[in-house]
Image: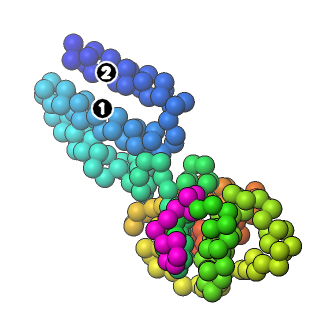
Amino acid sequence: MQYVILGGLAVAVLFGLVQLYARLNVKTLLQLTRYVVAAVLILGGIGLSFARQFQFGLPAIVFGLVALFRGRLGPLDLGAGSRSLGQASSVKARFVEATLDHDSGGFVGRVREGRYAGRDLDDLDEDEIKDLYSQVTSDPDSRALLEAYIDRRFPGWRQHSEEDGATGPGGASDSSAMTDEEAYEILGLLPGAGEAEIHAAHRRLLKGVHPDQGGSTFLAARINQAKDWLLGKHR
């Protein structure tokens, strides 16, 4: 009877998981799978232990606890390398920072320094954005990051800027130095992520910001730099 109950529970959980698949994004589903796998293993292990099948029950409980608290079961990643549900990452410059959404490829920005410090870019009107742009020209990375944001919010602004005689777009600085913390933030990973997780995050992010898809050269370069930096530590 115990096996029938546990089997029915496992089938019900799997059926529910399939039903939710179409509604949940991949990151949320990964986290849900983590708890489902842990629950099935722990409950199954308890059931086996009650049946005096300790040689199978105790290892199942241990594996369930490992899946629950570490987010990994052997080579199977159940969310250990993900920062959070609805995974996002951050790219920072002196004056502005951007938070990238891994699922949609979109990003939102926030002012870090200057007249509009502390305000979200989405809250600034077009005149304020232009004013901010004139303030960040001294920092190439801030300028490039702000240009990437304006390209998405105000398409065609570059042509108008040239017609108005405003400062034209500039390139990002060619800095090759990067800290581990910055690289993990850009890729949206926790410290210690493996090579497979680094490659997966890189591919996912690059799809949304690649210049060939109308994205940002600066953001694509930073994402590539973060990947190369972290992979270099694995060699």
Q: Position of residue 131 (x, y in %)?
A: 64, 74
* Disc 2: which residue: 9
Q: Is residue 213 left or right of residue 117?
A: right
Q: Secondary structure at mark 2?
A: helix
Q: Quadrant of residue 140?
A: bottom right
Magenta stretch? 113-123
**Type of amino acid at the residue the image marks with label 1:** Val
In the rendered image, the residue lying farthest to the front is 127
Q: Secondary structure at mark 1?
A: helix
In the rendered image, the residue lying farthest to the right is 163
Q: Position of residue 88 (x, y in %)?
A: 50, 56
How is the protein colored in the picture?
rainbow
In the rendered image, the residue lying farthest to the top is 1
- Residue 40 circle label: 1
Q: Which quadrant of the rendered structure holds the N terminus?
A: top left
Q: Residue at x 36, y 50 (%)?
A: 72
- Would residue 67 be visible to someone looking at this image? yes
* Image vertical order of residue 22 relative to residue 173, above or below: above
Q: Is residue 67 left or right of residue 27?
A: left
* Image vertical order of residue 34 relative to residue 199, above or below: above
Q: Disc 1 to disc 2, how far (Cα)?
A: 8 Å
* Residue situated in front as seen by the camera: 60 or 203: 203
